[in-house]
Image (cartoon, grey):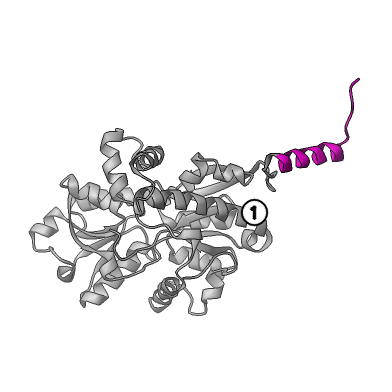
Amino acid sequence: MAMKMNRRQVLGSMGAAAAISGFSVPAFAKTKINVGALRFTSHAASFVAYERGYFADEGLDVEFQFFQAAQPMAIAIASGDVDYGVTAISGGLISLAQKGAAKVIGGALQEEKGIDGQKILASNAAYDAGLTAPAALDGKLWGITQAGSSFHYMGSKISAAEGVSLKYKPLQKVGAIIGALKSGQIDAWSIVPHIAKALAKGGAVKIIGNVSDYIPDYQVTTVFTSAHNAAKEREKTKAFLRAFARGADDFNAALVDKTAGEAAAEEMVKLIHKYVYASKPYEKAAPAIRNGAMRINKGAALNAASVRDQLDWFKAEGLVKGSVTFETLVDPSYVRQI
């Protein structure tokens, strides 16, 4: 004899079955979210969380939207086209936070002593003309995506420490900067190691220094979302951060701390290769991916001191309003501050 069940009975049975099996029904089952990313190794936590089902475990149905610079991603977050993103703090992001449209909710990539980080690069032409160290940057042309980008911040901090003056060339996209550096249209740039080392190994540029020597503990990228999500969608936002943090743990164990073993490292590189250097044969892409592994903060912890320093620089340069505070930019309620 067939037995009919009403909706409440069906849901109750699902909950009981889940409890018996040791699993819980995700609070946001099949909730679709768009996640912004760049095709960088530094965005691996999101890729790992997606590929290994950590987002799905939280009930989040993720679709990636890829960008070529930080500021367009910030605009997409504010407009609602993207729900969560990972990228560097930019003048655009700070301005959107000031308007009540965006919030930083966690940390991602960070410079850390003892771990090879971002590199300072010189074009071959500039190197041959004497640009063999950051101290020789005076008057040189430095590549940036836009004014107020992380590349602008890094260039300014490096030149200030060396007591030299730089000229800046906005080129909108990372790919355009790479082309300009290789052709000698710009003299210098700084970028994450998986790109820097690959360019240098190929003979296209020269490495002349390390960003960490000038900006120690630099919080290179942050996790951010719309102000609405931060304030009104707290459980969904926590779910995203939990999945992201699990991805970061796997990445760090495999390629940064190297505690997971060689098989796990190889598996991680293959996973990342789906998103980074995907057009290159695996054998050529793998060394760059391995060499580009920098720390992604455990639990998406945020280096508040670094974020404050960046905010102070943007205000001092007149790139954002002087009234913007740390609390305007950051919702500190989600993750630990370090």
Query: Which of these two is toward me, 16 or 65?
Result: 16
The amino acid on which the numbered mark 1 sits, given as a three-letter code, is Lys
What residue sits right under mark 1 in the picture? 236
Whether residue 17 appears in magenta in the rendering, the answer is yes
Image position of 329 (left or right of 212): right
Q: x, y (%) of residue 219?
A: 40, 65
Image position of 48 (left or right of 62): left
Q: In which quarter of the image is the N terminus?
A: top right
Q: What stretch is highlighted in magenta?
A: 1-20
The answer, for residue 68, to whether it is visible in the render is: no
Name which residue lies at 47% across and 44% down.
48
- Disc 1: CA contacts within 10 A as few (<14), some (14-19) or many (>=20): some
Q: Is mark 1 on a helix, strand or loop?
A: helix
The answer, for residue 171, to whether it is visible in the render is: yes
Name which residue lies at 22% across and 53% down.
181
Q: x, y (%) of residue 59?
A: 64, 44
